[in-house]
Image (spheres, rainbow, N blue to C red):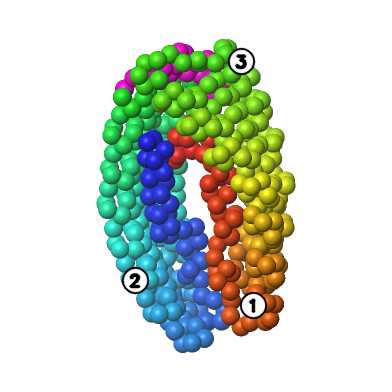
Amino acid sequence: MYLKSILCFLVALLVFFQCTPVMAQEDTLFIPQAHWKGQGVIKNKLREGLWSFKDHKQKLILEGTYKAGNMEGIWTRYNTDGTKRVEGGIEKGKLNGPFTAYYPNGNIKATGAYKSNLKEGDWFYHYPDGTEGLHAAYLNGALHGAYKMYNRAGGLVKSQYYLHGEKEGPCEIYNDKGKLITRGPYREGNLHGTWTFFDDQGRTLREGTYRFGKRNGAWHYYHTNGRLAFTEVWQEGKLDQVSAVFTETGKVLDKGTLLGGEGIAIRYYPNGVIQLKSEYKGGLKSGKEEQYSITGKLTAEYTYNQGVRDGEARLYDAQGKLQALVVYRNNLAEGETLFFHPNSNRAAVGAYAKGKKSGNWEFYNASKVMQVQGSFADDMRHGSWVYYYPNGKIAAKGLYLSGEQEGPWEYFTEKGQKSDTAPAMLKQTLQIWTAIDAARFITEDVEDPEEGAIL
């Protein structure tokens, strides 16, 4: 339930940031380009008064006033369809005064003010339909003061405070139904003090303290019926020991051998089935970790070194069949990776570089027939790609650049004859990769999912 709440929050966050403007280079939007045609008054060899700039199609792109050759006053940048893109005040060549950015539909995307090219005071960001998505305060270009984020329905998603660019004071996070799911304070940009995490019904799932970003002291975990599940004791970010562990009915479970930061820690599902077993050294995961499904099936085996996933990992499907062999370095997939079908035949082979697909990849169907072959760069299709029919004949081939098809592509029928029409399979997602990657490889660590969601 808690993961569901966190995912709802992250989805809301992602949707919002997809519609908020990236305001890093606003001043460059007002710089006239060399290929634009300007029209206005020249006085003493300097631009003076109202000036307008048009593109090669005579579309108005930029308009504003000059004073002794310097841009002064309100300037407006337009889209090619004539709608406003941004509008802002300029003084002595820098953004000063009110600033507004617009969506293509004319609704306001963001509004606020600048002082010498730095955001100042209250800024408001909106969704395309005009609903407010974020209210943030700035001082000298840094977040300073209240920071409130809203979903499309107007419900509060996050309430936070900043002090000179760093998180400070209380923070509250809500799910898409308006229920509080996380609450705790920051100090100097770090989680610091008591943090509490709730499920969708407002029930406490876990609670404990942080000291400058590191868990410290007792952390209590609860079942949804309110019973204590277990208590961990932390010392400056390192797990020292685990108290007695209970099922949701109060039955005592094996807590493992962890004591003084050394030994094996065991986590359970509410029904008492083991969720994971982890080896610890010096209070950090070091050695083997086994993860299990709620039915008790082994789903993954990882290797850790001083709290970092490092070494070979084996991932299994619901039937216990090997599904992937992955090597991790510093928590990221690195080097050759193999994926398998339920019948144990190879499904895909390729390499990772710092957690991203890189170089040549090959994808096969369950009958060992290659379906797709191509190269990746920075996790995007990049370079030559070939798609095959189940009979092994080429269906399509061509180039990708940064994830997009580039240049002419060649298409073929299942009999090997050239065709002017792209086969349906080319338009589909790489189904083999999607099924494996989404279902097993990009998994959430079952321990501490909340720490990556506190933003």
Where the C terminus falls, by quadrant?
A: top left
Q: Which of label 1 and label 2 is nearer to you?
A: 1
Q: Is residue 147 visible?
A: no
Question: Earlier along the polypeptide chain: callout 1 or callout 2?
Answer: 2
The local secondary structure at tag 2 comes to loop
On residue 105, the disc is: 2
Position of residue 231 measured from the top left corner of the image (x, y, whole percent)? 44, 17
Magenta extent: 226-246
Left/right of residue 306 with respect to residue 176 in the rendered view: right
- Is 36 drawn above or below residue 401 in the view shown? below
Mark 2, Cα crowd under 10 Å, few <14 / some 14-19 / many 20+, is: few
Residue that numbered label 1 is attached to: 413
- Is 229 drawn above or below residue 135 in the view shown? above
Mark 3, Cα crowd under 10 Å, few <14 / some 14-19 / many 20+, is: some
Q: Amino acid at mark 2?
A: Asn
Instruction: Tell me which residue sits at (38%, 44%) in the image.
Output: 9
Instruction: Tell me which residue sits at (40%, 54%) in the image.
Output: 15
Instruction: Using the image as rendered, state which of residue 447 and residue 16 is in the foreground.
Output: 447
Measure the C-alpha gap from mark 3 to mark 2: 60 Å
Measure the C-alpha gap from mark 3 to mark 1: 62 Å
On residue 240, the disc is: none
The local secondary structure at tag 1 comes to loop
Residue 242: within the magenta? Answer: yes
Magenta span: helix, strand or loop, mainly? Answer: strand
Where the N terminus falls, by quadrant?
A: top left
Position of residue 62 measured from the top left corner of the image (x, y, whole percent)? 44, 76
On residue 262, the disc is: 3
Q: Which of label 3 and label 1 is nearer to you?
A: 1
The local secondary structure at tag 3 comes to loop
Q: Amino acid at mark 3?
A: Glu
